[in-house]
Image (spheres, helix red, strand yellow):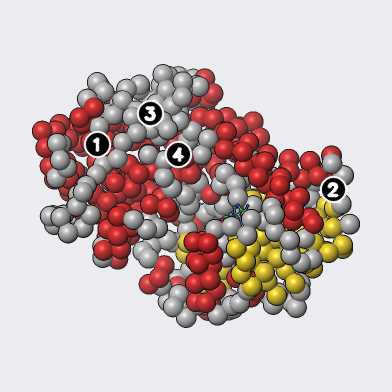
Amino acid sequence: MKSPHSRGPSSGRRPEGSQSGGQSGGGKSGGGKFGGGKSGGPSGGRPGGQRFGKGAPSGGRRSGPPGLAARELAADLVAGVEEGRLLDALLDGGDLAKRFEALEVKDRALVRAITGVALRRGGEIADVLGRLIEKPLPEAAKDLKPILTVAVAQMLFMEVPDHAAVSLAVEATDRVRGLSPWKGLVNAVLRRLGRERAELTTDVDAVWLNTPIWLMQRWIETYGEETARAFAAMHAIEPSLDLAVKEDPAHWAEVLGGTVLPTGGVRLVAHGAVENLPGFEEGAWWVQDAAASLPVHLLGDLAGKKVADLCAAPGGKTAMLAARGANVTAVDASGRRLERLKANLARLGLAANVVKADVAEWMGGPFDAVLLDAPCSATGTIRRHPDVAFLKGEADIAGLAVIQRRLLDQAIRLVKPGGLLVYCTCSLEPEEGPEQIRRLGLIDAPVERVPIMPDEVFGFAEMITPDGDLRTLPSQLPNPDARLAGLDGFYAARLRRL
Ligand SMILES: C[S@@+](CC[C@H](N)C(=O)[O-])C[C@H]1O[C@@H](n2cnc3c(N)ncnc32)[C@H](O)[C@@H]1O
């Protein structure tokens, strides 16, 4: 995989007279995933992973000054994503997860914050580093890149004093086998950034720098340039924490210092570990983006109905279906993710029949209603999962569309005649949304579309397509406080089985 910070041949700085940096400004980068920027850069674009304490998973690590362990772990996570692993996977078992768990709660929050910024603003950071380090670093120094990335993230985009970011980066460099000789360079580069930040960061088209070119071009084609830029702008901001509440959202909004959304959930500024928030232990709420709560509403009254939740784990929609009185069968192919689903339901005091199976082959039911939340490229969730922008490519979309087709064909077989099927994905790509439904028309599948009405989605008419499907966008649900704005990009279509 290419390093996400590897840049193309053309500059990502705003071309004179251009509104946007445009397609020619981003250019086809000859394989680099992110748009624009000076060529070269600190690692020459090689994927690399900082390896603090390599070979000494925990006991062999010297402790350092306060905050160092958080920076080291953030650098290792950034390196892990560059190597092609999802952040959630890196923090779900293994050495990095152990180091994360060993940190105090405030340092865990710091790791998440630094890693998030380093990934969200990865193109801008790489651009600055490319200006500061003109010649590619030699192979022996490639592991400097995540250390520098994390330091620049703090200096440019977080309220961390420069001296703290610089000294911890120098200390981190000193602790990696073979990197000590580069301490002076790290110090000099970061101090220069401190002195020259204004010159180094003006006239940058952040939207193009931080978004993979292929994705930006797709969005422009599908949604137009203004909307595509609005998505990308939202990706630079850490999103709110959205909660689905079992009952009494107004009470929980007050307790948690949030607001009740028109969709019925509670939204608050994200801070710290959710496990420590009031109501978590007693199972009063679960984390769910406001947009992700909408597909279940499209199934109408579910009390006493037999409902299949296909591709159900970790169970956000299962919980919603169960809380609405459905008799739910939750099916997923991943045993590990189903364990999380079971734990989530247990905490919430909700129940479902849990089945581990490949939905494409599973025979059950028939059901009064079926929800298929198909695996997808997740390009609608980049706000929440900035690593997705690094790890997905255009080829993934075509491959996922084939899987979605098989799952949708099977889901139709599982619905009783007259019953409803909601197909949804958290992707912004047409192949994973409306194209799937268009294909059903072409093959004469035994379903008809049941158009969604604005009052079923809390009056948000702008979320309904001319065909009557749901399409939410990262740029929707604006708020004067940017930390409380936005939605995941979701698509949903409602079908009736004939
Ligand atoms: C988008 S996530 C589902 C999120 C879930 N519905 C929720 O609301 O929490 C997609 C899920 O599809 C599952 N999956 C992927 N391919 C599958 C298949 N062929 N059969 C069953 N589950 C599958 C994955 O394990 C993953 O849990």
Alpha carbon separation for disc pair 4 and 3: 11 Å
Q: Secondary structure at mark 1?
A: loop
Alpha carbon separation for disc pair 4 and 2: 36 Å
The crowding category of the residue bearing disc 4, from other C-alpha atoms within 10 Å (few below 14, some 14 to 19, many at least 20), is many
Q: Quarter holding the N terminus?
A: top left
**Disc 4: residue Cβ within 8 A of ligand 1's nearest atom:** no
Alpha carbon separation for disc pair 3 and 2: 45 Å
First of labels 4, 2 by sequence position = 4
In the drawing, what numbered circle is on residue 6?
Answer: 3
In the drawing, what numbered circle is on residue 445?
Answer: 2
First of labels 3, 2 by sequence position = 3
The answer to the question of whether label 3 and label 1 lie on touching residues, with beta carbons closer than 8 A, is: no
Alpha carbon separation for disc pair 1 and 2: 53 Å
What residue is shown at x 11% (from left), y 37% (from top)?
180
Q: Position of residue 437 (x, y in %)?
A: 77, 45
- Tag nearer the camera, 4 or 1: 1
Residue indicated by mark 1: 143
First of labels 4, 3 by sequence position = 3
The crowding category of the residue bearing disc 3, from other C-alpha atoms within 10 Å (few below 14, some 14 to 19, many at least 20), is many
Residue 232 is left or right of residue 298, and the answer is left
